[in-house]
Amino acid sequence: VLLPLNFSENVKTTLVIGLGVSGQAATQLLARQGKRTFCIDRDPTKHSPGHFDWDRVEQVIVSPGVPLTHPVVQEADRRGIEVIGEIELGSRAIHNHAIGVTGTNGKTTTVLLLEHIFNQIGYKAVAVGNIGRSLCSYALNPRAEEWLIVELSSFQLETMHNRWLDGALFLNLTPDHLERYAGLEEYGRAKCRIEQCLKKGAKLWISQQVEKLTKCWLRNPVRFDLESGVQNILAVTALCRDLGFEEAALQRAIQTFQKPAHRMERVEEWHGISFYNDSKATNIDSVRYAVEQFSGPLILLAGGIDKGASYRPWIEQFQGKVRMIFAFGQAAQKMKGELENSIFVQCVEGLREALCTAMRNARQGDTILLSPGCSSFDQFQNYEHRGNEFKRMIKEKIWIEKKSS
Ligand code: UMA
């Protein structure tokens, strides 16, 4: 059959903004669905060649790292064109059971713990979302019997509407991403959108801390920490009990869970000095949590890309524990400016210099802790890269010291 000459010109286009992990997966899924896409990226090597015609745009898929103030998103809004995120797109293409997990800290560990429990108990489960495996890439080859445990960032929740979650956890809420949000309220409200993504009758489990801060923004949440204990275990236990998991099997599964790397990971001990990698700590409150786990004395290595919140809460939280801070990367000067009246802070170029200076200053009984409190993208690909480099540098430094002694 011969198609009319102008056929292809009438084909609608989906704009994909940001061609990273999410954008690439979204583009693949759209191609599978027979859709034509045009990719917009500030990196010219990822941007599609040529131009697009607004009159043919039927939908915009925005990557989580792209703020909704992006001019293309604003123009789409003005024209009444639907703007959704990669998770929303993926969720419309699958029929799996799914559990959503959000919060400022502890999301990844909780998602992995849930994945482990489900698999141990006999359900098949897969961790997806902000954890690194995009939902659209899963949606290319879904298996109906698998439960999805979906880590959801506030960025992803901003563009989600579909009611597809069979349950959700909202662990905690402390200042983060203030480079994107006007304040804690705007950030918190983005996270609260998780409630609108629940299927009818499904529950949102929240902590007391979240309850206090989000009272009028949530409709019908349920508290998970009515007893005391470790927060993510309480959250996961409440959800699993509600799903009808047998208590003994649940407790057995929790006990066999292995904590993932880069979270309070013990790396080495050398001449009475301990080294810990907590590269996953990318905001100020996760550093507080890390410091709380030690009785001191600590030498803290912190820095990277500043995310807008003040470091001043550390002054009280670090008292009597943190002897000195070696601050690196873009955030170093701000950290020093805010803390130096109370804590010794020295700015250094990068992580290597921070480690070397810390080792020169360390005494027996000290712990050298990398808990950066910032994003890693100024000097590393991501937090895993930063943590792996840190571990490699420690081994290398100790090897050199051993050789020369
Ligand atoms: N880009 C633009 N304009 C912008 C911003 C970005 O063109 O204004 C382009 C970049 O040039 C790049 C692409 O967009 O080509 C990157 O897109 P992205 O920043 O949305 O990142 P992805 O690679 O798609 O990864 C995203 C999440 N990243 C962010 O939310 C920043 C990943 O979470 C997630 O694993 C992945 O989708 C799969 O779901 C990372 C993260 O840092 C781990 N998340 C934040 C956090 O945990 O604190 C929210």
Image (spheres, helix red, strand yellow):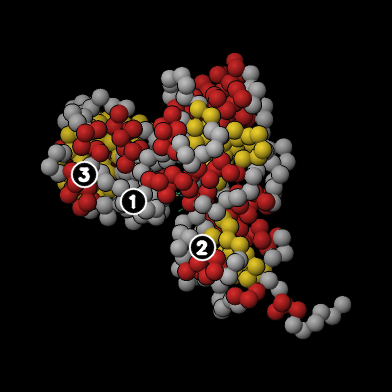
Element under label 2? loop
Q: Which mark is residue 18?
A: 2
* Residue under numbered circle 3: 326
Q: Residues within 10 Å of mark 2 (few under 14, many from 20)?
A: many
Q: Along the horizontal axis of the image, is 48 left or right of 395?
A: right
Mark 2 against mark 1, which lies toward the viewer?
Answer: 1
Element under label 3? strand
* Residue under numbered circle 1: 307
Quadrant in which the C terminus is drawn? top left
Q: Along the horizontal axis of the image, is 339 left or right of 153?
A: left
Q: Which quadrant of the view contains residue 402?
A: top left
Quadrant in which the N terminus is drawn? bottom right
Q: CA distance from mark 2 to mark 1?
A: 20 Å
Badge 2 amino acid: Gly
Badge 1 amino acid: Lys
Q: Earlier in the sequence, mark 2 or mark 1?
A: 2
Badge 3 amino acid: Phe
Q: Residues within 10 Å of mark 3 (few under 14, many from 20)?
A: many
Mark 2 against mark 3, which lies toward the viewer?
Answer: 2
Q: Is mark 2 within 8 Å of ligand 1?
A: yes
